[in-house]
Amino acid sequence: MQNSIEVVAEDRDTYYMNMGPQHPSTHGVLRLKLHLEGETILSAEPFIGYGHRAHEKMAENRDYLQFLPNTSRVDYLSGMIYNLAYCQAVEKMMAIEVPERAEYIRIIAAELNRISSHLLWMGTFLLDLGGITPFLYGFDDREKILDILDSITGSRLTYCYGRFGGVTMDVDEIFVAKTAEFCEYFRGRLDDFQRLVIGNVIFQERTKGVGVFDPELIQHYALSGPCLRAMGFARDVRKDEPYGIYERFDFEVQLGQRGDCFDRSTVRMGEMQQSLDIIEQALKELPDGPIMAAKVPKRIRPPEGDHHFAVESARGRFQHYIVSDGSDIPVRHKLSTPSFVNISTMPQVMPGTMLADAVAILGSIDIVVPEIDR
Amino acid sequence: MSVIAEKLKTHAGIEESTSADYATQGYHYLHRAQAAQLPAIATLFSAADFHLEMLTCVDLRESEQTFRLVYQFNCYGTPERHLIHVAVQPEAKGASISAVFAGANWYEREVFDMHGVAFDGHPDMKRILMDDDYIGHPLRKDFVDQDPQREEMASAE
């Protein structure tokens, strides 16, 4: 594939500009080397690794349980999903049965976390585009979710709530009541956001037709998550390869059409609604019973061979690839993250757009830099 | 058996082809292939509308004296996941498939950075996560951090 617009006449003035690593719209430490002519981007090259913490190396130096606290640090915005994904991966390898109640609690916690992640995306994306109000609104609501999750996990962002075979702490009536109350309240807020953000003319002007993903990119990069769904492809790991008890839930995959920044926004807005539906359904059906499997092996020694497990995180398809040699330390533990894929498409997506649009595009794909670098 | 699995069985460079248990392991087929044939195999997958989900490397020098590249292909819709194991001798190179799947470009750079296995035919074989002047490949099993900066920082304390 062509990487950039290299056809630049010799007499035209072009220059290079570094965006980042400390630019606020890069959401962490990411550097983009932009080749510009005036304000038009001719080529863009992302430089990553500033937030590399060697999670994979750590995984290969300790046993399975010891790696558990690392998982939510991979993506601190939807840490619950990453934490539970690791538990589910190990449970699948070890054939551990999880009690019904724990499965429902996991769904509620993961979907709450997905909403909080999307809310942060909305706030910061709008902030990147110059609108400060939605940021304050979004963070206000996000804080409500974090309080709810805090009450059952004891932490604000980097949860370690899952255990192999269940969850650490049971939810009580207060949690159920608070979550139900939040769902009702948040539906009204979503209508507000719909008017305030999606209906806003300035927002539409800034995002419609900007950062369109070429359909050719889908196969080349194995796109997933909201970026893919915004292009009209109904792909969601929760539907395609249901894990946990997702197949019991009735929800429709949110779709866009053109795959521009605007569609990616509407898809995420729809997903918040969809998560609310899932949470309400789970709260209604929440059974009584134990929250931990009765028998969990003390030493986790998965069968020899390759193991694969994927979930739908807030940003797309996240997978654990674990190679075991039958001992209690993995030979290889690869964390395959969606942001890594999304940001690697930038050399194809950015050329031809304006410098100000680069900010919009980066914001719309919802990158989390530590998740890229791991 | 699927169409592509059938084709792969007789494809040049495929040494072994087995079915896996999807319910427990998460993938459908496991193949062993020769490194040089990977671009041709990737082209076959590309033509069948598959995509490259993941590419990584496993350091097996202790047990098998080789590195193992792992390619993971899948298609959208009903999942049909193929893992391809490619044994690469230490000091040898893999064959780049970034011309077939542009997404492989970064995965290959990551393997080069972390395991020190380079890829023939890659347009820009350089480090991706570590600094350009970093010494060593962190995900090798015998890795010892030799970063001179680390010494400096330690002595400054």
Image (cartoon, helix red, strand yellow):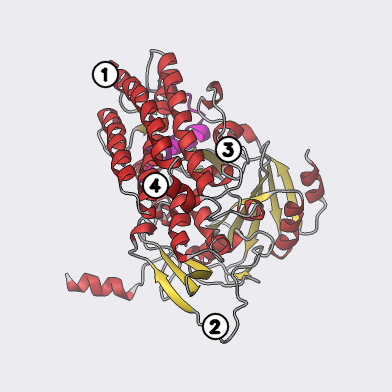
Mark closest to the chain's N terminus, 1 or 3: 1
Q: Secondary structure at mark 4?
A: loop
Q: Secondary structure at mark 3?
A: loop
Query: Which chain contains the residue that carries disc 2?
Result: A
Residue B39 position, x and y percent, is 72, 62
In the rendered image, which residue does mark 4 sit on?
A75
Callout in the foreground (4, 3)? 3
Q: Residues within 10 Å of mark 2 (few under 14, many from 20)?
A: few
Q: Residue furthest bottom?
A: A11
Mark closest to the chain's N terminus, 2 or 4: 2
Image quadrant for the N terminus of chain A?
bottom right
Q: Nearer the viewer, residue A92 or A36?
A: A36
Residue B6 position, x and y percent, is 81, 45
The residue at 53%/40% (across/down) is A310
Residue B40 position, x and y percent, is 75, 61
Callout in the foreground (2, 1)? 2
Give the numbered dot on residue B10. none
Spatial separation of the CA atoms under disc 2 and disc 1: 66 Å
Spatial separation of the CA atoms under disc 4 and disc 3: 24 Å
Label 1 and label 3 in one chain: yes
Label 2 and label 4 in one chain: yes
Callout in the foreground (2, 4)? 2
In the rendered image, which residue does mark 1 sit on?
A174
Left or right? Give the position of A213 relative to A286. right
Bounds of the magenta segment: A74-99
Mark closest to the chain's N terminus, 3 or 2: 2
Query: Which chain contains the residue that carries disc 4?
Result: A
Q: Nearer the viewer, residue A366 or A104?
A: A366
In the rendered image, which residue does mark 3 sit on?
A255
Callout in the foreground (1, 4)? 1
Left or right? Give the position of B116 relative to B75. left
Spatial separation of the CA atoms under disc 1 and disc 4: 28 Å
